[in-house]
Image (spheres, rainbow, N blue to C red):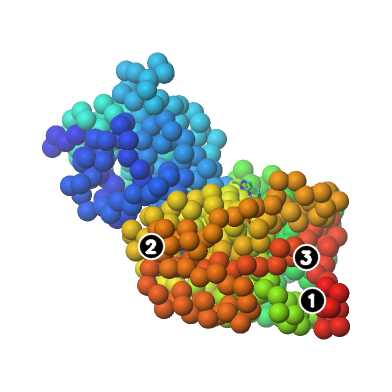
């Protein structure tokens, strides 16, 4: 059947199961936008293309499906770049489609021409340039397959205007044919046996659970392994939710802002079991002194991650769910009582330093607000964050019992991610509570999407933790630059009035007694609601491993007692 390239494109996209596309039109993508009207696609008109890529990302993280963003050529395409880089660093499957000038004009500096395939080459899993209509069906099917298979990631399709308009024969394709691309599933049996031997010998094992657990859906297999071998589970920032926070074997988050008992356990371990994680520098600290006594088993789908940062004893390259499924029947039951007792002792010290043990001094601390939100939502909401101090407090105090509930930019650390990602997550789960926890700095980077949230009726609750600073940078200046504050003070707009201009109900909270009342107001009010918490300006995130320092050289959270409060 003869169809235009734009029609073939939407035929294929609908066949991939896409229902919602986040985007912004312009000249080079107009034929595709025109054809879209004839297909069952809900298009979300954003206010800046960065918002579209973050919404597609939030949708993908929350749903496990591929998120889709669309923009025009030139500035439209380059505005997507931060969101693409964010998705790449965190292995999130999104497909971004950009209009491109007609094929015969490429290379001639045509109006709104930019070499977006060149620009995004290092920040996409793969990208395509469509120059004629007969390429469309194959490209779309390959793009979706590549985005979600193996180690997921963003794929970009640059779609020349002539290819959208021209006609070509369309026959639906089944599986894409990609001869050089075979994501591994099972690890070799001989390697599994080596791992089994190391596990049997270990006295102080620790599991390092990363984003790969969630990506591969290996939560049950992780639980089976941990219980059978009695191995405690430390999680990366993106691994949070892969193992229930309240489980006795949970060590919470590892790394720069991980709890001391977790980092101590890693440093004292004799075996590390890295499951779908990549030994990021925020996790390891100084590599020369990282887990010096531990042998290491690394289960990972991407072979390029093996030995990249940390040399391991047994690499198992394959899909984590599959490999753990193979491994679990082979490992013997473990008994590490002494080791678990030792960790419990370290944990006791942390409990004393926890904010739950702080006396009430009438001040609003950002960490208190997050703890209260956790209590208020029974830990069951989908929480997105921006980047900075509030992100780390959210990771520490919004204890997750379930997977796919914590959406945050870990690898790229992209300010401006949290709010649009929450809108994307709402499209994935309209039945769930969605809370965006953002800093006053990061929120201002993508707050134009207030219009999108309002017009779409997105039931997203925004919590701005307003400390009038670029808090995390301020903290580093306090600790490492002798408190010489440079370009971190924020003279903020009136966020409540701002929300009002968009027709969004809002409240400013300045008293502790109002913290939860405001949350109730937000919960009971349909659609987007903005809560601005005016919090202590100079609170610091503890513990903290200074960048590049030894993992156990932590700056600890001070113990706060009632008597000490007066001088606090
Ligand atoms: C796009 C972008 N620009 C700059 C940074 C560097 N950076 C990391 S945290 C931070 C401060 C964030 O401030 P705010 O959003 O107010 O959150 P807070 O740390 O106060 O919770 C900055 C500037 C970044 N991560 N992303």
Residue 560 percent across, percent down from the top left:
82, 77
Percent from the top left, x then y, of residue 372?
60, 78
Q: Earlier in the sequence, mark 1 or mark 3?
A: 1
Q: Report if residue 176 is visible in the image.
A: no
Front one among 94 and 505: 505
Mark found first going from the N terminus, 3 or 2: 2
Residue 113 vs residue 168, the one in the foreground: 113
Q: Residue furthest top?
A: 108
Instruction: Kindly state the secondary structure of the residue where label 1 is placed.
Output: helix
How dense is the environment of label 2, judged by Cα within 10 Å: few (below 14), some, or many (20 and up)? some
As helix, strand or loop, the secondary structure at mark 2 comes to: loop
Residue closest to the eye, 6 or 292: 6
Find disc 1 in the rendering and name its residue.
353
Give the total number of marks visible in the rendering.
3
The residue at 33%/52% (across/down) is 44
Q: Quadrant of the C terminus?
A: bottom right
Camera sees residue 102? yes
Q: Earlier in the sequence, mark 2 or mark 1?
A: 1
Which quadrant would residue 237 be assigned to in this image? bottom right
Residue 164: image location, x then y, percent: 25, 32
At label 1, counting other C-alpha atoms closer than 10 Å, the crowd grade (few under 14, some 14-19, many 20 or more) is some
Tell me, for residue 543, which label it has, or none.
Answer: 3
- What SS does tag 3 mark? loop
Q: CA distance from mark 2 to mark 1?
A: 42 Å
- Residue 130 position in % (x across, y down): 33, 30
Q: What residue would you read off at disc 2?
A: 503
Mark 3–mark 2 distance (CA, rounded to whole Å): 40 Å
The image shows residue 494, relative to residue 126, as above or below, that is below
Q: Decide: is 40 above or below 371.
A: above
């Amino acid at each position: 059947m003869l169809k235009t390239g734009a029609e073939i494109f939407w035929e294929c996209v609908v066949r991939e199961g896409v229902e919602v596309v986040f985007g912004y039109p312009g000249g080079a993508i107009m034929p595709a936008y025109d054809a879209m009207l004839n297909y069952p696609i809900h298009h979300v008109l954003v206010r800046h293309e960065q918002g579209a890529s973050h919404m597609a990302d939030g949708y993908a993280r929350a749903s496990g499906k591929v998120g889709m963003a669309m923009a025009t050529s030139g500035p439209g395409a380059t505005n997507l770049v931060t969101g693409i880089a964010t998705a790449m660093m965190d292995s999130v499957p999104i497909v971004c489609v950009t209009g491109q000038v007609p094929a015969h004009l490429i290379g001639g500096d045509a109006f709104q021409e930019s070499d977006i395939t060149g620009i995004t080459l290092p920040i996409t899993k793969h990208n395509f340039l469509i120059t004629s209509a007969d390429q469309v069906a194959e490209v779309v099917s390959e793009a979706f397959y590549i985005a979600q298979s193996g180690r997921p990631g963003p794929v970009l399709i640059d779609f020349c205007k002539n290819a959208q308009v021209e006609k070509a024969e369309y026959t639906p394709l089944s599986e894409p044919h990609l001869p050089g691309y075979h994501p591994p599933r099972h690890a070799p049996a001989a390697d599994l046996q080596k791992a089994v031997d190391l596990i049997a010998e270990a006295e102080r094992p620790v599991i390092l659970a990363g984003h790969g657990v969630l990506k591969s859906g290996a939560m049950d297999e992780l639980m089976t392994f941990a219980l059978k071998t009695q191995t405690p589970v430390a999680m990366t920032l993106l691994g949070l939710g892969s193992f229930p926070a309240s489980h006795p074997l949970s060590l919470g988050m590892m790394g720069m802002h991980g709890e001391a008992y977790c980092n101590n356990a890693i440093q004292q371990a004799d075996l590390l079991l890295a499951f779908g994680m990549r030994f990021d520098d925020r996790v390891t600290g100084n590599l020369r002194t990282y887990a010096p006594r531990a042998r290491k088993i690394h289960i990972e789908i991407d072979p390029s991650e093996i030995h990249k940062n940390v040399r391991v004893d047994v690499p198992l390259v394959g899909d984590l769910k599959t490999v753990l499924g193979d491994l679990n029947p082979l490992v013997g039951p473990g008994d590490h009582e002494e080791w678990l007792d030792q960790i419990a002792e370290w944990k006791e010290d942390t409990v004393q330093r926890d904010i739950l043990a702080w006396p009430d001094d009438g001040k609003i601390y950002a960490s208190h607000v997050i703890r209260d939100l956790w209590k208020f939502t029974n830990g069951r909401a989908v929480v997105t964050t921006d980047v900075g101090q509030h992100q780390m407090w959210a990771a520490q105090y919004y204890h997750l019992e379930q997977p796919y509930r914590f959406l945050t930019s870990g690898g790229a650390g992209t300010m401006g991610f949290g709010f649009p990602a929450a809108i994307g997550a709402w499209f994935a789960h309209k039945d769930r509570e969605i809370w965006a926890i953002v800093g006053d700095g990061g929120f201002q980077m993508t707050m134009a999407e207030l219009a999108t949230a309002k017009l779409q009726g997105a039931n997203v609750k925004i919590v701005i933790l307003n400390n009038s600073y670029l808090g995390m940078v301020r903290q580093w200046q306090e600790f490492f630059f002798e408190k010489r504050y440079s370009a971190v003070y924020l003279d903020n707009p009136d966020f409540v009035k701002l929300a009002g201009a968009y027709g969004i109900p809002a409240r400013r909270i300045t008293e502790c007694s109002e913290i939860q009342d405001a949350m109730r107001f937000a919960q009971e009010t349909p659609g987007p609601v903005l809560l601005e918490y005016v919090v202590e300006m100079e609170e610091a995130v503890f513990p903290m491993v200074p960048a590049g320092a030894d993992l156990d050289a932590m700056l600890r959270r001070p113990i706060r007692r009632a008597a000490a409060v007066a001088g606090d």
